Image (cartoon, rainbow, N blue to C red):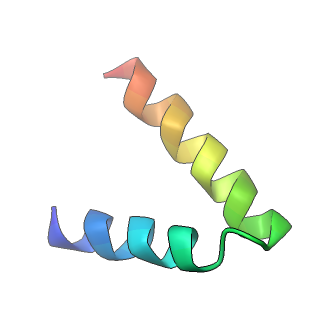
Amino acid sequence: MGIGKEILREILNESRSPVASFCGLALRGVIKLY
């Protein structure tokens, strides 16, 4: 899951941007499905 961690790190680093926030919410929704 190295790629996933890199993506999460990017989202955390860019948490101020609305696009990153949306991606974060989308990832949380996907994680909840599992």
Please indicate whether residue 5 sits to the left or right of residue 24 in the image.
left
Between residue 16 and residue 23, name the one nearer to us. Answer: 16
Q: Is residue 8 above or below residue 13?
A: above
Tell me where residue 25 appears, x and y as whole percent: 64, 43
Left or right: residue 29 versus residue 21 is left
**Which residue is painted at 73% across and 53% down in the image?**
22
1 up-or-down from 9: above or below: above
Residue sticking out furthest to the right: 18
Residue at the extreme top of the image, as rendered: 33
- In the displayed structure, 6 sits above or below 29; it is below
Q: Is residue 21 left or right of residue 8?
A: right
Q: Position of residue 29 (x, y in %)?
A: 54, 30
Find residue 34 and report its horizontal and vertical position in percent: 30, 22
Question: In the image, what residue occupies the spot 25% across and 73% down?
Answer: 3
Give coordinates of residue 11: x percent, y percent: 55, 69
State left or right for residue 22 relative to residue 32.
right
Q: Is residue 33 above or below residue 6?
A: above
Q: Quadrant of the N terminus?
A: bottom left
Which residue is at 77% across, 67% downward?
A: 19
**Furthest residue in direction left, as rendered:** 1
